[in-house]
Amino acid sequence: MNRAVGVAKMQLINKWTFLGIPAVIIAGSFLLSAVIWALIPDSVGVKYSGAGQAVMWYFFGLGIQSLTLSFPFSQGLSVSRRNFFLGTVGLFTVLAAAISAFYVILGFVEQATNGWGLQGRMFAISWVADRFWFSQWFFYFVLMMFLFLLGFWAATVYKRWQATGVLVMSLSAAVLLVGAVALITLQGWWPAVGAWIITLTPLSIGALAFAFVLVLGFAAFTTLRRATP
Amino acid sequence: MSTPVVQVQDLCRNYRDVLALDHVSLSLEQDKIYGLLGRNVAGKTTLMSIMTAQGFASSGSVRVFGEAPYENEKVLSRICFIRESQKYPDDFKPMHAFRAAAIFYKNWDNELALRLAKDFQLPMKRRIKKLSRGQLSAVGVIIGLASRAELTFFDEPYLGLDAVARQLFYDRLLADYAEFPRTIVLSSHLIDEVANLLEHIIIIDQGRIIVDDDAENIRGQAVNVAGTATRVDAFTAGRTILHREQLGALQSVTLDGALSAAERREAHELGLEIGPVSLQQFVIRKTLDVGLSPDDLEQDAQGSDSKTRTGVAR
C-alpha cells in the first residue's frame, strides 16, 4: 500500500481533527448567524455575516497541529518525510476541495432562498458569488490551502529552529511588506496600484494566491526534509 | 556471513560545540539482540536516531539493509524505533496509536498488541497524554513488539514500569523473538536487569564506542580479586586494574582480562577470593574509571573510599 495514503489514513484515525471540528464550526457559525439574522428587522436589507471564514482560520491551526502532533509520531513509525508531507497535504487538498464545493452550493441555495428566508448572506459573498461557479470554488479553495500551508510551514520552521526561526521568518515577512509599501510610496506608484486592485477578480486573486500556495508548499517541504522529531 | 543489517562508519554528530558522537563505527548482524549500554547522555538516542534516519549525522555514513536509510521507504518500512520521549498526536488514545502502527507495518500482529495491552493493564481508551510514565512506556513497548519490524529499537523501554511489568516485557520479548527472530537493539542504563537477554553488547560513553563484543566474551573479561591488601597488591602487580576499593586491611580489585588456570591456583594459594564481575559492574568500571591513571585510582581508593564503597555496593 502506498504509505502516503497511509499517512492520510493516520491523520483521519481520530475523525474529529480533520472532519468533526470543521463540520461543527461551519454548522455552529451558520446557526449563530441565522439566529442573529432572525433578530434583525428585515427593513435593513441584506444582512451580511463574516462567519463563513471561521472555518478557514481553523485551517491555519490545523496546519500547525497536523505537523506538530503527527510528524514526530510518523517518524516513530518510520514514515519518510516525503510521504508524511504528501499524505498530510494531499488529505487537506481533498478536504479543501470538498468544503469549497460545499460553500459554492450553499451560496447558490442562499441566493435561491432569499438568504435562507432571512435575507442573510454568509456563503454567497456578493463580490464572489456573482462569478462563474469555478471562480468561486477556486477562490475558496486557494484561500483554504493558503492558510493551511502557512500554518504547516510555520510549524515546520518552529520544529527546526524553534522560536528564533519563527521570529526571523515573521520579521523578514514584515520587513518585506514594509519595504514594498515604502517603495510604492517613494516611487509614487499608489495610483497605479489602486487601478490594479480595481481590476482584480476572484479568479485573478485566486491565481495570485495559488502562486503563493505553491511557494509555501515548496518551502514547507524543503524545511521538513531536514526536520527532526 | 550475510551482510550486516546495519553498518555505521566513522559517524560524527556535533551539537554546536558538543561532540555527541565521536567517530563511531559498528555493525549489527541479523537476528541478534544487541544491548546499547551507556550513561544517560552517552549518545545512545542520537546514534539510534541517525541509524533510523530520524536524526542527521554531521559526517560519516550509515547503511541499513545495505542502503542509505534517509527518505528510503524500502528500508524504513522494515524499521521500528519508538523513542523514550516519543510524542503522540494530542488526541490519540493507545488504540489509535496501534491502529496507526497497523497501517505501516505489514507484519503487525494486532492480537499480540491487544494481549500485551491487557498484560500491561493499559487503559486503551484514555488519552495518551494523560497516561502515567509507565503506561506511556507500555505503549511504546507494545508498538515495538507487535510491529515485528526486522530491525526494532527499544529506547529505555522500562522507564516507569514496575518490576512485574518489566519482567513481563523481558519475557514477552524473548518469547516473541524465539518465534520471530529479528534484529533488536535495546538501549539501557539498567544493565544487570537486561544482561541475560543480550547476545552482543555495545557500550558507548561520551559519544565513543568503548566496548563492542559478544556478551559471552565480556562476562569473562574482568574478574574481582579480594583479600588482604598486601597480598592483593602482590598478586595484581603489573596487571591492568579497572577498579580498587579498600576497607580497612581488606582490598578488592577489579582486574581487566581473564585469569589463567595457573593464576587462579596462585590466587587460591594466597587465600584470595576470586569472583565474577557483573555486566553492570563492568560497564561502570569501564565508563567511570577509564582514563584514570593508576595514581588517580590509588588516591580515589584511599581518599574517598567511603564514597566509592556506596557507589559500588553489590
Image (cartoon, rainbow, N blue to C red):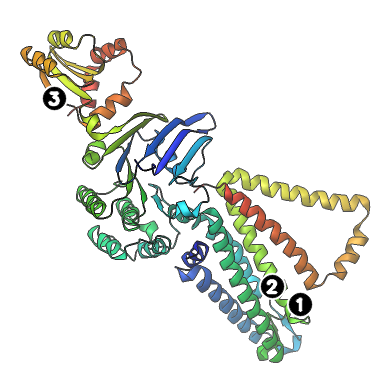
Helix, strand or loop at mark 1: helix
Chain containing the residue with disc 2: A
Q: Identify the residue at horizontal 52%, vertical 62% (top origin).
A: A4
Q: Position of residue A50 (x, y in %)?
A: 68, 74
Q: Position of residue A214 (x, y in %)?
A: 70, 60
Chain containing the residue with disc 1: A
Residue at the farthest front position = B1
Disc 3 marks a residue whose amino acid type is Gly
Q: Which residue is mark 3?
A: B275
Q: Position of residue A24 (x, y in %)?
A: 53, 75
Inter-mark Cα distance, 1 to 3: 86 Å
* Above or below for A91 versus B139: below
Q: Camera-side residue: B276 or B150? A: B150
2 and 3 marks in contact (CB < 8 Å): no
Chain containing the residue with disc 3: B
- Whichever of labels 1 and 2 marks the residue nearer the N terminus, that label is 1
Q: Which residue is mark 1?
A: A128
1 and 2 marks in contact (CB < 8 Å): yes
Q: Which residue is mark 2?
A: A140
Foreground: disc 2 or disc 3: 3
Using the image, tell me which numbered label, if any, was put on residue B133: none
Q: Camera-side residue: A203 or B174? A: B174
